[in-house]
Structure formats: C-alpha cells, structure tokens
Amino acid sequence: MSRLLEIQNLSVEYRRGRQVIPAVRHVNLTVEAGETLGLVGESGCGKSTLALSILKLLPETEAKITGGRIVFEGRNLLQSPVETLRKIRGERIGMIFQDPFSSLNPVFTIGNQMTETLVWHNLSHPSRKARELLAQVQLTDAERILSSYPHQISGGQRQRVMIALAICAKPKLLIADEPTTALDVTIQKEIMDLLIQLQKELNMSVILVTHNLALVSQNTKRCAVMNAGEIVEEGMTGDVIQHPHHPYTQTLLRCVPSLAR
Amino acid sequence: MLIIYWRRLLKNRLALAGTFFITLLIMIAVLAPWLSPRDPLQQDLLSRLQSPSRVHFFGTDDLGRDVFSRVLYGTRVSLTVGILAVLISVLVGTSIGLLSGYLGGWWDGVLMRSVDVLLCFPVIFLILMAVAFLEPSINNVMIIIGLTSWMGLSRLVRGEVLSLKERDFIQAAKALGVPSRRILIVHLLPNAISPIVVSATLGVGGAILTEAALSFLGLGVQPPMPSWGNILTVGKDYMHIAWWLSIFPGLAILVTVLAFNLLGEGLRDVLDPRLET
Amino acid sequence: MLAYTFKRLLFAIPILFGITLITFGVMHLAPGRPTDALTDMNVKVTAQARQRLIKLYGLDQPWPIQYGRWLKRLSALDFGRSFRDDRPVVSKIAERLPATLLLNGCSLLLILILSIPLGVYSALKRNSVIDKGLSVFVFVGYSVPTFWLALLLMIGVGIKLGWLPISGLHSLDSDEMPRLSQWLDMGRHLVLPVFVMAFTSLAGMSRYVRNEMLEVIHQDYIRAARARGLGESRVIFKHALGNALIPVVTVLGLSLPDMIGGSFIFETIFAYPGMGRLGYEAVMARDYPVIMGVGVIAAALTLLGNLLADLTYAWVDPRVRVR
C-alpha cells in the first residue's frame, strides 16, 4: 500500500482582528491509496480546517497556514505554484462539502455547471459524459436534472450532483467534508453507500470528515480522532472503537451508546 | 442600554468628526452677527464683483455685498431649513409607517401604494411645481422639502414595525388589552428609533442640498436673504468675469452636508443592532 | 416569465392612474385658475370673455368630471395645447424627449462602465489604495452639491480651459457640418452634463457593487467552484459576478427617478434642449398643460424603468421566476 497523501506537522491559525486562534496544531496524518480514512471530532475541533487546507481552500484573509507540509504524489502542495494546485483540484483530488444547496451556484443550471467542469477538465463529449455521470451517481431523471436550477431539485439529488462533479475526472483522492450532515436520515445512508461504491469503482481514497462516530464505524477502515486541533488517536477503526486509548476518544464513544461496549 | 450606545459613540471616529463640525457650524450660525465683518445685506454699488481681498475675504457680489458675511449668514438658512424640513418628514413618515405597519390589511395596501406612486415622481418635479405655485420663501421651501421626502422613511418604519409586530412582547401587550395607540407609541416606536435617527441625520444633508439647489434655481430662498444657493446663482450669472463667487458657497455646502453624513454614518455603526451581543 | 410580465404590467396600471390623479390634483390645488395666466395680463379681456374661456376649458365643471375628461384625452395622447405658443403639448414633448433620453441613457452607461470594474476591484483588493479611495469618494460624492460641481466644471473646463462647450446640444453652426462632425459635436456637448449627472450615482453604485461582490465571494459555491479546479478568472467573472450583478440591475432601475429628476436641474443649468428644461420653463411660465404633460410622462418613464428593472431581475435570477 503506497502513501497517497502525507500531512506532516501541519499548523493553521485563524486571525480575526487582533485575535489569533490556533485551529490545527502540528498534525500528522497519512492516507494510503485506495483506503477510506475517517476524521472524527466535535464541531470546532479543526477537522474541516484540516480538510480545507489540503487544497488550500481556506479564506485567505482569515486563515493562515503557519507550518508543515502536505505531500501528495511526491509534491508539497503548500509550496506548489497556483497553476499546479489548480490542476490538482478536481483532477487529482476532489472535494465535496456539507451543504449541497449552498455549494452549487444558484443562478446557473445543473447542466451548465456540469458541462463547464467537464470541459474545463478536457473531458470529451461533455454532454454525454454528464449523463453518464448522473447515472453513475444513481440519478435517473437526467434530462430534468440537467435543465434544472439547484433550488428545483432535492437535497439528496444535489449532493449526488456534487459527487458527480467531484469525481468526473477520476481523482485519486476524494475529501468528503460532512457529506451527509445536511441531509435527511434516510438519504444519508444512500449517499454513504454511493460513496463507498464509487470508491471501489474508481479505486480512490476517501477522507471522510464527520462528527458522526456511527458513520465512521460503518464505513471506514482506518480513522483518526481530532480534538482541539490535534490528532489524539489513530488506528484501525475497529480497534479505536473497541479499545480506545485516549480519554477523549473514550468520552466520545460514551456519547454513542450503540457503539460502546 | 443607552450607556452602551454612548460609549460606542464616543469611540466612533466618524460620529465624532461629524459632531465636531456640526457644532462648529451651529456656532457660526448663532454667532454670525459677531463674526461677519460687514452687514450681509448692505449694498455698495461702487464695489461690485470684486475679487477676494483683505477687505472682502470672499469678494463682493453683483450688488457690492460682502460675500464672506453672506456665506456666514447663509449657515443659518441651511441649518434651519435642513433640520426643520427633516423634522417634518420624520413626523409624517414615522406616523404613516407606524400606522401602515401596525394596521396592515387595507390601510397598509392603500398607504403603501400611494407611497409607490409618489416615489414615481421625480421629487424635484414635485417640488418645482409646488414651489412655483406657492411663492418661494424659506418657510415654503422647508415645508415642501419636508412633505416630499418622507416616503423612504415611512417604508423603513413600516418594515421595522412589521418585524416587531410578531414579537412576543407586542403580542403580550395586545393580549393584556393595552390600547393600540399606547402600543404604537410606547412599545413599537422606541424599538424603531435607531433607523429613524440615522435616516433623519442623513436626511438633513439631503434637505440642505435640495434647498441649495432650489435657491440656486431661484425657487427657494429669495435674495436679499442670503442662502448658499442664491449666492451661487450670482456666481453662475457672472461666471465669465467673477469665477471666484462660485467657489466658497459651494464649499460651505459641501462641508456642512459632509458633516451630517459623517455623523449619520457614525450613528449607523453605533446603533447597528448586529453589534448587540 | 410571460405570466410574470403580464402580472407586473397589471399592477402598474393602478399606479399609472395614481400618477395622473396626483398630477391633476397638484395642478388644481394651485391658487388661481389655470386660465389666469392667459387672461390676467390682458387688460382688454372682459369678465364675459374670461367666463367663456373658463367654459371652454371646462374649468367650471366639478373636479371628477374634469379629471375624467382629461383622462380620456390623455388616453388619446392629447395633452392639450401649450398656453405659451398654442402648440400641441405632445409635439413639444416629443421633440425634447429624445434629447433627455440620450442624456439619461449615456449617464446610465457611464455609471455601468465605471462602477462595475471599480466595485469589483475594490472587493477583490480590500483595503488597497483604490478601495480606501473609493470609500472616501463615496462619502464626498454624497455630500457634493452636484449643481455646484456642474458650475465648477463649466467654469474650469469650459471657460478657463475652453475644452468643452457648456450649453446646448449642438453648436450654432452644426447644421453646416458634415455628419461625423455633427455627431462629435453632440458628443462634446454631452460630456459635462453626462458626467455631472452620473457623478453621485457613480459613487453609490460602485460601493453597492463592491458590497455585493464581497458577499458573494464568501459564499460556499465559490469555494466549491475553486475546489473543482476552475480558474480564478472564471470563478470571479462567471460565478461571482453572475450573482453579484443581479441586485445591481434592480438598483439601477431604482435610481431612475433621481436621474429623471436630475434632468430638470441639469438641463436647465446646461441649457440642454431636453424635456427637463421644458418642464422647468413651463413651471416658471405657469404653462399648465405642458406642466401636466411633462409630469405624467416623467412619472410614466420612471414607472417603465422600474418595471424593466423588475423584469430584467426576474429574467436573470432563476430563483424569482419559479414563483
């Protein structure tokens, strides 16, 4: 198993006026090829910040990466020129976000946004590819969806569209930041199943960022627990859940009675 | 709670700057008779259209009057018209806004449609018509500006009332049988005050600009009473030979309106409900 | 979309009625009778003749009837005849309206051309020199008496430097010029009035564009677009601007009343042969039919502008249409 992504000693700070708030402290994390890694923690522990820093998507005026390296396919992303980073986004690393409604541009049709992305990544026959992608994410009503605006389709459909957009160029790594949190419970399982299936089909790695331990236990092989900007525990998911070492992990597990012994 | 506002006000640079200048202007207006080197109404036909000198700081106008003194006295006109016109528009606008928002239904519909219609008219045209038919004078100008600029405020107040109407404390008051008039004045109004204050302050600047424009066109304050606008009329008539007449009254208007705008914007920051923690 | 258009047009009708009502009301609230202007100056007019004139204009009828009659004539575009030169009001307005539309149109264009880049730049480069300069500019812009600005420019650029003409739309000898020179001549005449008219709105609109852009830039879909690898210019110009410009369009429509109102003042100052100046002269001369005509047309144009703004907004923003 080769290492796809290596985060080494990463630190990120938020700056608001005179205040400096550390969000990520000296984090080390690796992602192997083809595996699903869970990144668990409560709101505010820094997991989303960590996820966003991989593709340098943090708001520049507020957040600053103060140290560390993020090595992907042999390159340090934090030192890469803008053009390289842009090429990696979408094509080598894809990302989906928590709220599919606000992650799609409200004034353009789904078809418009999909075609735009497909053309941008130089994928041939974009209109045909768009329909294939929609089928791949299990959306059947392709015509209607392509001609609709984001507010005209349901939350679950929007998230599937987002996933389609993220995997269209067959990236090696998919970062999923709370992909099911904003969805209804019944849809959550469908989306997770879809993600797992796509992971197998495309042989890609997935980083699943979530506060939902149950989700992690069901869908990931390895996981890392985060608290206050630091990784406090890491290991095979089964082990972490059944034999938690760190007191924080133990507290977390106690809150989910179905998982605790 | 007022103490919070007071403290914020003292820290806000815009508001402080504005207040400073406004105080200065009020002092000039009040002390004009003592500050003016000459009588602003005194004509001296032998010294017409003189350029600025040590004797006449801003020069003289077409009838030999000292422009500096006239500009100083002009402060009185501008401040009076500005403040009183706004007072009128606040009175009318707030009343209509309160009624419209609180009563809702048919009243709301009629009042707001009327506001829509009135807003279609270029305000200037309404003012032009009105002022032309009633002889132009400082009082008429005040009243007319007041009566043609309340529409925006009424919509603002109505909006506030609408959002406050459903709040618990209003429902409670109603349930307790408090008469509507009391609810309006004692409960709703104080909460809607912030946007009214900001709008009023900024409105003074607007009223001053309108009065100046009207006087400039000959439809406002009539000479010999000095208004910054009508001094500029002379500037326009003689712009080829006495260009300096056009500079100072305009600067006076600029500074005055700027002062009120600074205060208004400062107040807006200070009274911003989003800063409430 | 069609249904929405129809609905808006329907709602506009009562407003149109309101406009005619108010114009009518203001006219008849004025002291004296409209015909006084015709008769007062002429000593030879007997009381009898005066009565006949009043009857001729129907001024002895009760108000509602007068209003009804006037409305009927309005719908046939008959605004009556000017008291000053007895020409049909419609003709007088028709010959001046294009000039006013030209002036306002150019102002609007200038505002758009300058304020959008300025606002976008300020939003992207916050706290840069240009951004801070813009804030100052907005403040000053809102405080400057624009007629004074017009005066200063006339003196500075027109008289002292002699670069641009300060009045009218055509030079005296423009009839003798070849076509192209005529156009250029008009252009030169338009520079000062257009600039002054656009000035205040420019400040406000730039700030508005800036604020809208700032809001949009922080939205999730911008981040998501970047995450897909889209280039920065595409993200800014298609995704961000595409959203930010939508409210800008509406605000533009709302600035129409101020602009048409501004016409009255600036056309007078610059002796520009437009409808605004016609209205001003009519007011000064108590030429009631013209006043009423100009009033109604001005208000109707504003209404039209607002309507167009609404419709454009609905056309451009898909979220509105679905209602």
Image: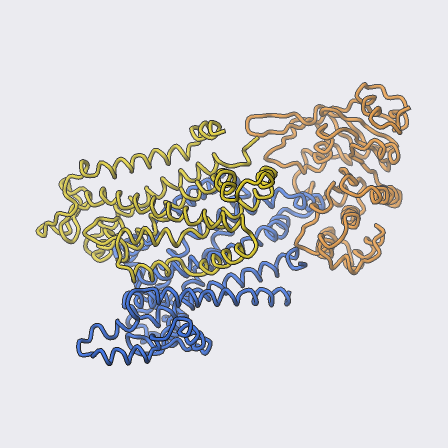
Residue at 56% from the left image edge and 42% from the top image edge: B164
Instruction: Depth check: give the residue in front, A229 or A151.
Output: A151
Instruction: Please tell me which residue lies in front, B79 or A67.
Output: B79
Residue C296 image point, x, y percent:
42, 68
Q: Residue at x 74, y 41 (%)?
A: A97
In this rendering, is residue C153 above or below A94?
Answer: below
Residue C215 position within the rendered picture, expressed as x and y whole percent measured from the top left: 58, 44
In this picture, residue C241 sits left or right of residue A122 = left
Left or right relative to B103: residue A118: right
Give the quadrant of residue A126. Answer: bottom right
Q: Looking at this view, is C220 or B203 the one in front?
A: B203
Left or right of B44, for residue C271? right
Q: Which chain is yellow?
A: B
Chain that appears blue: C
Location of the C terminus of chain C (image quadrant): bottom right
Residue B196: percent from the left, percent from the top?
45, 42
Q: In this image, B276 relative to B62: left or right?
A: right
Q: Is residue C169 in view from this perspective?
A: no
Q: Which chain is orange?
A: A
